[in-house]
Image (spheres, helix red, strand yellow):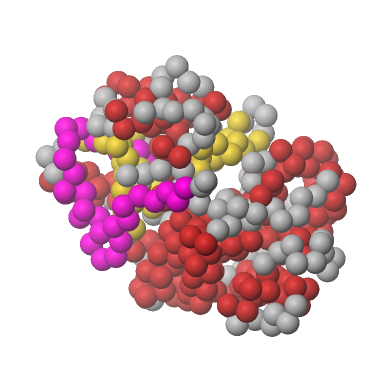
Amino acid sequence: MWYFSSPLIVYGEDALSHLTTLEGHRAALITDDTLVRLGFAARVIQNLQQAGLQVVCYDHVEPEPSLEQVQAGARFLLEHQPDWIVALGGGSVIDAAKAMWILYARPDLEPEAINPIERFNLRERARFVAIPTTSGTGSEVTWAIVLTNRAERRKLGLGSREAIADIAIVDPALVLDLPPRLTADTGLDALTHAIEGFTSTYHNDFTDGLCLKAAKLVFEYLPRAYRYGREDAEARAHMHFAATIAGLGFGNAMAALAHGMGHALGAIFHIPHGRAVALALPYTIAYCASGEPGSTRYAELAAYLGLPAGNEQTAAQSLLRAVWDLMKQVDQPVTLAEAGISRDDLAREMEWLVAHAMNDTQTIMSPRIPDESEMQTIFWQIYSGEIDL
């Protein structure tokens, strides 16, 4: 038995105005200071106030939110007692807000104890709205929560099926002015979600179509969104929807090895999440395709994308080259060396990287799981750009 989880998704032009229909007493807006400065938070607050809600705002969320940060945010919620929690931001903000929501319901809990087994009864205190301002993480429709343990320099893959938003508001107007670099990073995150969701060992009939569609949208529209920005509103909208579609797909099928390795790279070297997982993706495709014949689904995926797919090896080669080509179109590094990581730094951190990637919750959904020696080899391949296929 398995489950498919999804919020109510409100999308398209003027989707933000759905906030005026909420019923309740007090909303807590969780965001960051950049979105306050840009005026996005004020737009959300105005809509919430039109619904008759009192609004309080916590705007201290930082990139790669830490355990300590979500504890501070939970204390804010306990002080103000909202019945709606509204997360406005990228994946960091939405993940942090989900964790705060859980700790608001369960003040006795340590954030690292968030798990998919225990029941938290979240909606007895508040319901949750997620409003993404980047087109990549899909956090608005998933129940995954990624937090950073700064003391141990590692990312924690946490989550609870209860912690899926009640409402996801996917309004393309919020990403029209997304900077090119952030467009590339988050767009490649969406692509990695789609590819890994389709090929993970937890893939299923309910998620396959979502992952295929999302991958196709990213290949078609990311270069345009990156190059033209707000001048190409069509590309912006399709990329924003692609990120949510990919989130629904991988959120119900899980990710795989590129995410396990990307989490480790992000925690150690502070590489943005989307860039880190995309760096790992072509090399993990090659690694998985070199395993037991027929163990991946690259031929089906490549054929859908219109790539050469005569057999598994051909499909894997054409797919990883397509990923590389897309990365180059949006001026992304394709190796760790290009990303500014030195050979000495990689060697010094290798033991930590391997340990964190091996223990990551996403690694175990890979169609092929490396041992420690193989994991180290893949990291060195990501550094140098050498593909073994």
| Above or below, comparing residue 185 to residue 37 in the picture | below
Q: Which residues are magenta?
A: 3-31
Quarter holding the C terminus is: bottom right
Left or right: residue 274 versus residue 378 is left
Q: 273 or 123, which lies in front? A: 123
* Rendered residue at 49%/70% (across/down): 213
Q: 244 or 271, which lies in front? A: 244
- Percent of width and height locating residue 268: 69, 41
- Percent of width and height locating residue 68: 51, 26
* Rendered residue at 42%/49% (across/down): 5
User: Does residue 33 appear in the picture of this structure?
Assistant: no
- Percent of width and height locating residue 229: 42, 70
Q: 176 or 293, which lies in front? A: 293
| Above or below, comparing residue 158 to residue 10 in the picture | above
- Picture quadrant of residue 56: top left
Q: Residue 12: within the magenta?
A: yes
- Percent of width and height locating residue 91: 47, 48
Q: Residue furthest toward the right? A: 373
Q: 170 or 274, which lies in front? A: 170
Left or right: residue 46 versus residue 138 is left
User: Does residue 27 appear in the picture of this structure?
Assistant: yes
Q: Residue furthest toward the front? A: 1
Q: Residue 334: within the magenta?
A: no
Q: How many marks?
A: 0
Left or right: residue 378 versus residue 66 is right
* Rendered residue at 32%/56% (across/down): 9
* Rendered residue at 29%/65% (across/down): 12
Q: Residue furthest toward the top? A: 108
